[in-house]
Amino acid sequence: MLAPHPPGPSVHRGYSWPGLEKVSQTIYADGEEDKQAASSEDFAQQPNVWLPEDVLPGFREFTTRFYWRCFDAAKELLRALALGIGLDDEDFFLRFHSGVNNQLRLLHYPPVERERLARNEIARMPAHSDWGTITILFQDAGGGLQVEDPNQQGHFVDATPIANALVMNVGDLLMRWSNDYLKSTLHRVTLPTLAPSQDSGGEPSMTAPRYSIPYFVSPDPTAVIECLSACTDAQNPPRYPPVTQEEYRKVRARGQYL
Ligand SMILES: O=C(O)CCC(=O)C(=O)O
Ligand SMILES: [Fe+2]
């Protein structure tokens, strides 16, 4: 193993093999390890785990550049969200996000038997919400990502791939900030929507592999997330107590909700 995932389920770095997280094959990379080590203890405990440079020349440099490019796009979204929520200060969210606590994941879902996936005997990724502020997601053309209809529990709709478009998920912390005005929806990855004949020419009883790249945008660990007054009033009091990102991450890593 050239870039092994560190022990324990809550540290997301390096290569994570199928089954480790009940997900699939993933490579995690986080921003810039120099910055992390310098910026907080937390990141010193979670240094990146890179492949040796000669195994995949340029991977580290490219991935790091891509990480910060994604953050540029995310900052535009955070500004738009601030205005959409009704804040006067479009930079409000930026003050809580230096970018070092984001996470870039390169996901590979190997081919699986269609029947078993259809019968829910295996899941590509079970239903969950993301923990951070927002997630931006790049997905291939195969389909399979579904989002729960917030008005109809248990009813999932396809997030059909659109060429050159990214998907943006609202995470739990933006839901808390906005006092449920923006919902962090449950989503999952299931059977590809592409017909077997359109798959990449493999076995018809097997799905094609799936590739996706989520970029999780999280506040800095010490940021306090508190329901915004723009989203609360007498009829709509704050639904959540203030919490730091670090506290919330730990609670969710234990499989709990606050
Ligand atoms: O692979 C996908 O499209 C979804 C990934 C996802 O939801 C996640 O990693 O949190
Ligand atoms: Fe997700």
Image (tube, grey):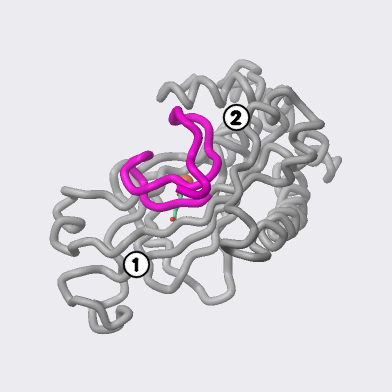
| Picture coordinates of residue 173, whole percent (x, y) | 60, 33
The secondary element bearing badge 2 is classed as: helix
Magenta-colored stretch includes residue 17: yes
Q: Are there few (<14), some (14-19), or many (20+) residues within 10 Å of tag 2?
A: many
- From which residue to which does the magenta span run? 1-27
Circles 1 and 2: CB distance less than 8 Å? no
Residue extending furthest toward the front: 54
Residue at 54% x, 49% y is: 169
Rendering quarter of residue 222: top right
**Label 1 belongs to which residue?**
209
Residue extending furthest toward the top: 241
Nearest the eye: 152 or 35: 35
- Left or right: residue 153 compared with residue 239: left
Residue at 59% x, 64% y is: 56
| Picture coordinates of residue 245, whole percent (x, y) | 64, 26
**Label 2 belongs to which residue?**
176
Is 247 drawn above or below residue 53 in the view shown? Answer: above
Task: Look at label 2 and name its amino acid.
Answer: Arg
Say if residue 86 shows up in the picture.
no
Task: Look at label 1 and name its amino acid.
Answer: Pro
Is 138 drawn above or below residue 79 in the view shown? Answer: below
| Picture coordinates of residue 237, whole percent (x, y) | 61, 20
- Left or right: residue 165 compared with residue 23: right
Tag of residue 102: none
Q: How many marks?
A: 2
Nearest the eye: 55 or 237: 55
Rendering quarter of residue 97: top right
| Picture coordinates of residue 236, whole percent (x, y) | 59, 25
Does any atom of ligand 1 lie closer than 8 Å to the CB of label 1?
Answer: no
Residue at 54% x, 53% y is: 214
Nearest the eye: 163 or 17: 17
